[in-house]
């Protein structure tokens, strides 16, 4: 690995991270959406850093402007969800980025146009995006952002993230797990194909993918076998019901089953760890 990657990451963070994270936090101050708020943006950037270092080990095309662009795109990509949780939030996030640069007076970064495209199109899961991590290629900002955003949708955090956003979008409870498993399966298949030269990263996140699948398979079974499913307060179904009615409010967890409590204890731990 070229040691310059750590210098480039540090330079980008010193220049942009504090201001952009503060801006994201201010936008979500009165908008409760923990799965995609300012902390989500920071987690995605932290995943981007890991991915940048992994790809840097076999690809010589990385440079400071790419690292800077990935950071800026990561800190803006879902800010549009302050206004809309629909599929058009990428366009709204791009507009939020454009507005911030107009109002802040900051000099435009070298890859500004590429940053805007990555923000707007980060949910466009084309094969070519995932196939760019090759020794002879020049990876795009969009590739790093898309893969990191997908990785953040796995494991304990991913269970919450998928549930919250799908519930907000009005997905019925009986369809929820089916839709999530289908979406997550498609995403992880592309990650495996695109990141095959990052075996350490794949090994770690395959475990998180398996955790998410195991949870929603149990959820699907409970939904099928349980009458009055919306009242259940144990198991995977109990977790989803708590997210549906309480979000991250832990004040009423004493009313839930032990396994529901354990899930939220693990979630709190994972969220704190991912902010580091």
Image (tube, helix red, strand yellow):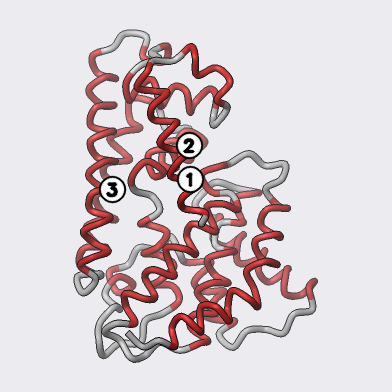
Whether 264 is drawn above or below 79: the answer is: above
Which label was assigned to residue 271? 1
> Which residue is located at x 31 percent, y 39 percent?
179
Contact check, label 1 and label 3, Cβ < 8 Å: no
**Mark 2 and mark 1: span between their CA atoms?**
15 Å
Whether 130 is drawn above or below 87: the answer is: below
Whether 148 is drawn above or below 228: the answer is: below
**Mark 3 and mark 2: span between their CA atoms?**
18 Å
Which label was assigned to residue 164? 2
> Which residue is located at x 71 percent, y 60 percent?
23
Contact check, label 3 and label 2, Cβ < 8 Å: no
> Badge 1: how crowded within 10 Å, few (<14), some, or many (20+)?
some
Whether 110 is drawn above or below 253: the answer is: below
Which label was assigned to residue 208? 3
Considering depth in this image, is 117 or 248 the residue closer to the camera? 248
First in sequence: mark 1 vs mark 3? 3
Where is residue 76? Give x, y as percent: 59, 64
> Which residue is located at x 50 percent, y 74 percent?
70
Q: Is residue 153 left or right of residue 131?
A: right
**Mark 1 and mark 3: span between their CA atoms?**
14 Å
Q: Looking at the rendering, which quadrant does residue 138 occupy?
A: bottom left
First in sequence: mark 2 vs mark 1? 2
> Badge 3: how crowded within 10 Å, few (<14), some, or many (20+)?
many
Q: Is residue 161 left or right of residue 92?
A: left
Contact check, label 2 and label 1, Cβ < 8 Å: no
Q: Secondary structure at mark 2?
A: helix
Where is residue 143? Give x, y as percent: 38, 72
Count of all numbered marks drawn on residues in the image: 3
């Amino acid at each position: 690995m070229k040691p310059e990657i750590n210098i480039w990451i540090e330079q980008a963070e010193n220049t942009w991270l504090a201001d952009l994270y503060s801006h994201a936090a201010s936008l979500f101050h009165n908008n409760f959406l923990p799965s995609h708020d300012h902390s989500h943006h920071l987690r995605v950037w932290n995943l981007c850093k890991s991915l940048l270092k992994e790809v840097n080990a076999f690809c010589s095309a990385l440079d400071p402007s790419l690292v800077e662009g990935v950071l800026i795109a990561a800190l803006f990509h879902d800010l549009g969800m302050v206004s809309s949780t629909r599929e058009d939030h990428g366009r709204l996030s791009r507009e939020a980025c454009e507005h911030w640069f107009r109002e802040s007076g900051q000099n435009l970064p070298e890859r500004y146009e590429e940053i805007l495209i990555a923000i707007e199109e980060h949910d466009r899961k084309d094969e070519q995006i995932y196939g760019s991590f090759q020794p002879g290629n020049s990876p795009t900002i969009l590739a790093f952002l898309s893969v990191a955003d997908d990785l953040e949708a796995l494991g304990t955090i991913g269970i919450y993230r998928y549930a919250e956003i799908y519930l907000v979008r009005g997905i019925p409870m009986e369809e929820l797990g089916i839709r999530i498993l289908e979406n997550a399966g498609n995403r992880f298949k592309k990650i495996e194909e695109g990141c095959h030269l990052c075996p350490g990263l794949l090994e770690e996140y395959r475990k998180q993918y398996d955790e998410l699948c195991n949870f929603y398979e149990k959820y699907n079974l409970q939904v099928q076998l349980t009458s009055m499913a919306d009242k259940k307060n144990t198991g995977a179904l109990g977790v989803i019901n708590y997210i549906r009615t309480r979000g991250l409010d832990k004040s009423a967890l004493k009313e839930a089953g032990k396994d529901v409590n354990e899930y939220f204890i693990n979630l709190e731990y994972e969220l704190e760890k991912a902010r580091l």
